[in-house]
Image: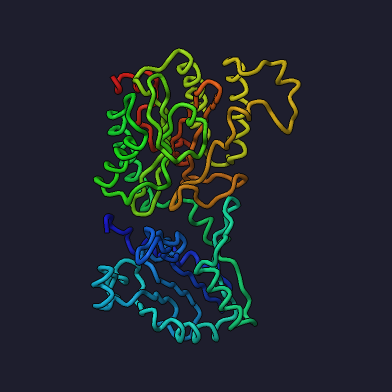
Amino acid sequence: MKYTSLHSDFYSSNRQKVVSEMELNSVAILTSHDEYPRSGDTAHPFKQNAELLYLCGIDQEETTLVLAPWHHNPEYREVLFVKNPSPEMVVWYGHRLTKEQTTEISGIKNVMFVESLENTLHDILVNSQNIYLHIPENPRMRITHPTQELRLIEKLRKTYPLHTYKRLAPILFPLRMVKQAEEFKVLKKACEITHKAFLRALKAVKPDIYEYEIEAELIYEMIKLGATGHSFAPIVATGADTCILHYIKNDKKMQDGDLLLMDFGAEYANYAADITRTVPVNGKFTPRQKQVYQAVLDIYKETIPMFKPGMTIHKINDFVFKRMEEEMIKLGLFTEEEVKNQPKEKPLFKKYFMHNTSHFIGLDVHDVGQREMMFQAGMVLSCEPGIYIADERIGIRLETDIVVGENPIDLFADVPVEIEEIEMLMS
C-alpha cells in the first residue's frame, strides 16, 4: 500500500465502542463495497466502505466483518472474512492480504476466507436475536443500484425473517464524527500533500494553457507524495466557469485577466483533505477582483474562530449569510432598500452565494454529520464562503479544513490566502 495502516489498537477500540452500544444477543455485519466494472476485464479504482474501514482497516474488496460479542463460541465474537489469495488470483490481480497480515492490520485473531462465510454466519445468526446492518445514510445521496450492502439485507431478511433488524448508523456515525489522535495524523498528512500540490500548481498558472494542465500538476504532486489521488473530482475552473459550483470538465484555455478557482484535495490513507483557492491567471488581480476577493476573505477569516463546541452548521450559516448581505451591498450587487423589500423565501444574497458554508470531513470529503448537529471538540469541518458574479466572470471561493475546539485549528493555516501573498508567489 502507499500508506501505513493506522495502528490495530485504533480499530480494536472502535469495535469495542460499537459493541458496547449494541443490545444483548446481537450481531453486526458489515461488508466491503463492490468493485464496479469499467469495461471488458477492467474495473474502476476500488473505494472501500468507510464504516468497514473504520472498524477493521482492511482496504480490500470482498471483505466482511461480523461482530457477535455474546456468542457462546469465543472464536465467533469477532470474525473477519477476506478473499482467498490463491496463486491463480494473484497472477492476475496481484497481492491480496494473507490471514496473518489481516490480523496484524485489524487486531482480529479469527480470520477466515470468504468461502466459509455462509456456514459460519448461519451458526452466528441462529444464536442471535438482533442483526445490526448498515447502508449509506446521507440526505444528499440516494442509492440507485443494488449495492452489496442492500443485497445482503435482502438475503438476510428472506433467510431470517423472524430476527429484529437494526440500524448501525446511529452507533457508528457519532463515533466517526469525533476524530482521534490516529486520524489527525493522516488528516494532517493529507493536508500537507494538498498544500504542496497547490504550491506546485501555482507556479504553472499562466494565460493560454489549459485547466487540465493545472489539474495534471496537482495530481503529479499528490501521487509523488504518497496520496492515492484526489479525494473528490477536482474543480479547476476559469472565467465564467468559476461560477459553476461543481464544474469538473477542466477543459478550457485559461485567459489573461480571468480568475482560476481550484477546489481539490488529496486522499491519504482514505482520509480526505479539501481546500479552495482562487488566483488571477496572469498573476495580478484587477481592482474589481480584489474588491470581491477581499469581501470573501474578510468573511472567511471572521468565520474560522466560530468553529467551537456548541456551534452548528446552521449557526455558522446564519452568521455568514448576514455578512454576505452586508458585503454584497458594499459591492453594489443590490441596495439596502432592496434587502428590506426582498421576499423571505428568496433572499437577494442567494443569487451570489448559493451553497452552505460548511460540511463535515473525514473518511469521506462530505463525511457523516448533519447541519443541526452540535459541534464537539475533535470534529473536522470545512469553512468555505464564496461570492459568484456570473455577469462579471468573477467566482471566488476560499476554503479550509478546521478542527473544532475552544481554539479552532486551521489545518491549512500556512497555505497562502492573502492577496499580496498570492500575487508575490505568482510573480
Q: Is residue 324 visible?
A: yes
Instruction: Give the x, y percent position of residue 363.
Output: 43, 53
Outermost residue on the top side: it is 287
The residue that appears at 62% across and 17% down in the rendered structure is 329
The quadrant in which residue 355 appears is top right
Q: How many marks?
A: 0
**Could you say which is closer to the camera, residue 290 or residue 208?**
208
Residue 379 drawn above or below residue 383: below
**Could you say which is closer to the camera, residue 145 or residue 266?**
145
Instruction: Give the x, y percent position of residue 377.
Output: 49, 45
Outermost residue on the front side: it is 40
Residue 175 drawn above or below residue 243: below
The residue that appears at 53% across and 33% down in the rendered structure is 306
Instruction: Give the x, y percent position of residue 39.
Output: 39, 62
Q: Is residue 275 visible?
A: no
**Could you say which is closer to the camera, residue 310 or residue 334?**
334
The quadrant in which residue 252 appears is top left
* Image quarter (top left, top right, bottom left or bottom right) of the N terminus: bottom left
Q: Is residue 15 left or right of residue 350?
A: left
The residue that appears at 40% across and 82% down in the rendered structure is 75
Instruction: Give the x, y percent position of residue 414.
Output: 34, 31
The residue that appears at 58% across and 30% down in the rendered structure is 353
Q: Is residue 66 left or right of residue 331?
A: left
Residue 124 drawn above or below residue 293: below
Colour option used? rainbow
Residue 337 drawn above or below residue 149: above
Q: Is residue 227 left or right of residue 382?
A: left
* Image quarter (top left, top right, bottom left or bottom right) of the C terminus: top left
**Could you say which is closer to the camera, residue 258 or residue 279?**
258
